[in-house]
Amino acid sequence: MSHYDFRILGKEHAAYPNQLDCTHNCTYIIQLLNPATGEIELELCPLSAEQFVGVLLEVIESCHLSA
Ligand SMILES: [Zn+2]
């Protein structure tokens, strides 16, 4: 079982600053790293990460409902 590693960085160190889409003055970002390759899978500011997780949870929940 592999699990995702993560890094917390100052926003100015973002690998893909033009993809961040952060309009909330967040000061740091979260990078999720692929456990196999070590590559950055996902880079989000904390507020975008919360929204992202919320959407994922909704999708999972709807899968449970339709199963
Ligand atoms: Zn933000």
Image (cartoon, rainbow, N blue to C red):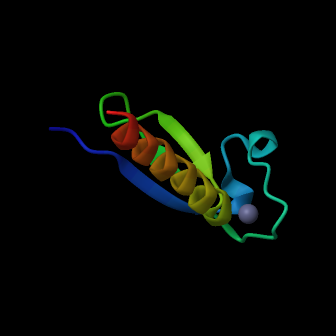
Quadrant (top left/top right/bottom left/bottom right) for the C terminus: top left
Identify the residue at the far top of this view. Answer: 37
Residue 18 percent location from the top left of the image: 81, 41
Instruction: Evaluate whether residue 30 shows in this view.
Output: no
Quadrant (top left/top right/bottom left/bottom right) for the N terminus: top left
Quadrant in the rendering for residue 65: top left
Image quarter for ligand 1? bottom right
Residue 26 percent location from the top left of the image: 73, 69
Residue 44, placed above or below residue 19: below
Residue occupying the point 68% across, 50% down:
14
Residue 28 percent location from the top left of the image: 65, 67
Identify the residue at the far right of this view. Answer: 23
Residue occupying the point 67% across, 54% down:
13
Residue 12, placed above or below residue 18: below
Quadrant in the rendering for residue 38: top left
Residue 53, placed above or below residue 66: below
Quadrant in the rendering for residue 11: bottom right
Identify the residue at the far left of this view. Answer: 1
Toward the viewer: 4 or 62?
62
- Judged left or right of residue 42, residue 4 is left
